[in-house]
Image (spheres, grey):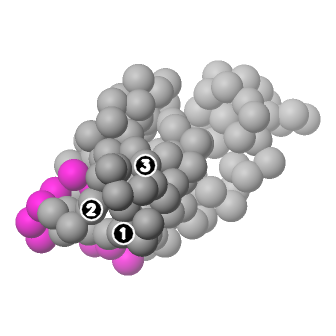
Amino acid sequence: MKGYYKYPRKEIVELIKKSPKTCDGYYYFPKFSHYNLKIGNIDNERDTKYYYKRELFKNKICFNEYDINCYLSTLEINYDVNKMEFIDEKVKDIIKDFTDLKLNDKIPSENYTLNELIDTSIFFYNNKYI
């Protein structure tokens, strides 16, 4: 049913917080979009109380605490949605071929891990976007 989601946001956040963290403290949850956008029926959660729509987070794979707070926010807060969407899209594109790896696995034919690739990419785009 339109407007209802199978998984409540608080339940999704519990899954995010059980996910492994990168060295820079980002939760790595590549299955987020499956849980976030899964449509439910009338008995499931209706998302009208949250300020930020779920669709804004559709490319999210990595979360810091501030991202999580914004995802759960019922009020507008100082959150640069455009920057978040830009970085999420870039990180998702960079690691798309490696989502089957664990965080500390080496990238094939490279001398760095998925963990390092994610942290470096987020750092780079955070500084580039300024």
Q: Amino acid at mark 1?
A: Gly
Q: Check whether the beta carbons of the residues at disc 1 and disc 3 lie within 8 A of each other.
A: no
Q: Amino acid at mark 3?
A: Lys
Judge left or right: residue 63 versus residue 71.
Answer: right
Q: Quadrant location of residue 113?
A: top right
**Measured along the vertical axis of the image, is residue 17 above or below residue 46?**
above
C-alpha span from label 2 to label 3: 11 Å
Q: Which mark is residue 47?
A: 2
The residue positioned 21% from the left and 52% from the top of the image is: 72
**Measured along the vertical axis of the image, is residue 32 above or below residue 100?**
below
Q: Main secondary structure of the magenta part?
A: loop
Residue 56 included in the magenta stretch of the image: no
Rendering coords of residue 44 (x, y %): 34, 50
Judge left or right: residue 83 versus residue 100.
Answer: left
Q: Quadrant location of residue 26?
A: top left
Q: Check whether the beta carbons of the residues at disc 2 and disc 1 lie within 8 A of each other.
A: yes
Closest to the observer, 4 or 116: 4
C-alpha span from label 1 to label 3: 10 Å
Q: Amino acid at mark 2?
A: Asp
Label 2, residues with CA under 10 Å away: few <14, some 14-19, many ≥20: some
Would residue 9 be visible to someone looking at this image? yes
Rendering coords of residue 109 (x, y %): 90, 35
The residue positioned 49% from the left and 71% from the top of the image is: 86
Judge left or right: residue 65 versus residue 100.
Answer: left
C-alpha span from label 2 to label 1: 7 Å
| Boundaries of the magenta span | 71-82
Question: Residue at label 1?
Answer: 3
Closest to the observer, 116 or 47: 47
Question: Residue at label 3?
Answer: 6
